[in-house]
Image (cartoon, helix red, strand yellow):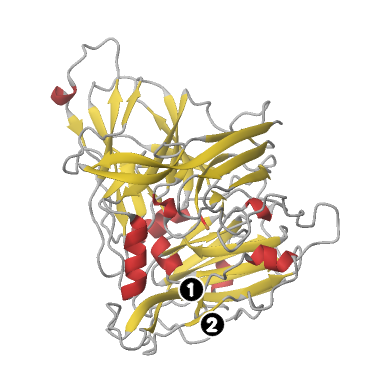
Amino acid sequence: SRTRHYTFHIEYHNVTRLCHTRSILSVNRQFPGPRLIAREGDRVLVNVVNHISNNVSLHWHGVRQLTSGWSDGPAYITQCPIQTNQSYTYNFTITGQRGTLLWHAHISWLRATIYGPIVILPRQNESYPFEKPYKEIPIILGEWFNVDPEAVISQALQTGAGPNVSDAYTINGLPGPLYNCSSEDTFRLKVKPGKTYLLRLINAALNDELFFSIANHTLTVVEADAVYVKPFDTDIILITPGQTANALLKTKPNFPNATYLMTARPYFTGRGTFDNSTTAGFLQYNQPSHPHYPLKNLPLFKPTLPAINATNFVANFTNKFKSLASSKYPANVPQKVDKKFLFTVGLGTTPCPSNTTCQGPTNTTKFAASVNNVSFSLPSTALLQAYYFKQSNGVYTTDFPTNPTRPFNYTGTPPNNTSVSNGTKTLVLSFNTSVEVVLQDTSILGAESHPLHLHGFNFFVVGQGFGNYDPIKDPAKFNLVDPVERNTFGVPAGGWVAFRFLADNPGVWFMHCHLDVHTSWGLKMAWLVLDGTGPNQKLQQPPFDLPQC
Ligand code: C2O
């Protein structure tokens, strides 16, 4: 293994999409940002230099960061943000992971434009547990705003209303030909016939779970969140913000020269406004033996995507993921559990400040979101620093409620009282606790799917279902043999998901909905995992250049 050095300059960069030019926040004036490539076992050093007027921090989404929590990146959780003209070097080792992940800004809504792929190749002498691809192609789904996304979220938080939606979805930063003023901004993938391509799919969108498909082609999913899965074929992929997946695309040996659209559009279960538009790119066959037609004369094929609220499709699709669970890549599912938690996740409200009119659910309330009725407020210093230097007083408490604090009944009437409480509460685990968490979507303000992301760990998704979780009947159906191992998984709309993980990584670890609007409203919490006593069971010392608040 080796050490890989990167320098990421956070800079302004003029980008035009949909005939709107905006000075966006970028890394190295690239949009999407640069590819970070490493092999399993490599050490990665990324020197981040902040040249913009906003504070910034970067997160290596899904990288386990074993004992290196100082490099995880969520602002005010593991570090204070990097201020203007300051720099910070993230320093971590890729341990036991291979596949695709993503990196993104982790403060406010800056990840709208500050994101890019993490490509983790197998160790030098190892191969893939599937056919060696002819080429590997990152496909990053995202969103484009014609206005500054920071203005969108700050206005929403002031008025208490839902934020304005983006103006387009994008494939590798490009909205594609189905939007006005966009046909030049189309991602084109030129392929040769009879080859196998590895698509490294990433959903970097702020607020949308997305369906993805390529006309007339089947995809074979081989990996998810940098863990190999049992290969399965599908025409349509659902990918939530924060999720990644590798899929093989086999081009046909004798397909006519044509343009096959690849498209993505949202899966949406909430209420209120959403944008049901479609981003598209071109898959173009390049057959040397055929005459070359001008693009506009080529036949065009379009895929069909599921309905916007196709919850049953999503449940079936997400159940197809299984760990490889081979001798080389075992699934180390905790078989016995030390601690069980039931958390409700969902929307709620907080009162509107007096003498103002809010545009939230009522004119006296603002939207909020919570875990076990606690809407998490970010502290003004980083939790990890406060913990490490024993300065938790006034920063956080350790009384996170370990069970629901009010009913969440689906079959009956949801509680009238929608209000949530605010707090910076953590949940403390001793080292190597094996944990089972059931996340239950609530019906307060309507059922909605929540892609929950856990920092610092992968978890095994042992079960999911609709309605109220039944602590007697449901565990009997848990898959403890080959459940999928992920870092982000959607709590089904009007349902629950159960996962297990081993708390083998000391530090402070964020868990939140990866729909940024829900994170902004407080659907987030923090685990505090204590040091173990053995070697490599302690949080490392803070780096000398750790930013200060
Ligand atoms: Cu990809 Cu806490 O985020």
Give x and y (percent) for residue 338: 72, 71
In front here: 507 or 242?
507
Instruction: Look at the image and tell me whether residue 330 can be seen.
Output: yes
Characterize the local packing of mark 1: few (<14), some (14-19) or many (20 or more) Cα atoms within 10 angstroms: many
Tell me: residue 335, above or below residue 443: above
**Quadrant position of residue 216:** top left
Question: Is there CB contact under 8 Å for labels 1 and 2?
Answer: yes
Quadrant housing the C terminus: bottom right
Q: Position of residue 197 (x, y in %)?
A: 43, 28
Instruction: From the viewer's perspective, tell me whether residue 242 is left or right of residue 265.
Output: right
Q: Secondary structure at mark 1?
A: strand
Gap in angstroms between the C-alphas marked 1 and 2: 9 Å
| Drawn side of residue 291 relative to residue 119, left or right | left
Q: Give the residue number, with chain letter if any, for mark 2.
A: 404
Residue drawn where x is 46% and y is 54% of the image: 54
- Is 126 on the left or on the right of 278, as rendered? right
Residue, disc 1: 440
The quadrant of the rendering that contains the N terminus is top right
Residue drawn at (63%, 44%) of the image? 89
Q: Check the image and report above or below for 438 versus 289.
A: below
Specify the amino acid type for callout 1: Gln
If you read the primary sequence from the N terminus, does the residue marked by circle 1 or circle 2 appear first? 2
Residue 96's spot in the image, x, y percent?
A: 67, 43
Q: Amino acid at mark 2?
A: Pro
**Residue 88, labelled with which disc?**
none
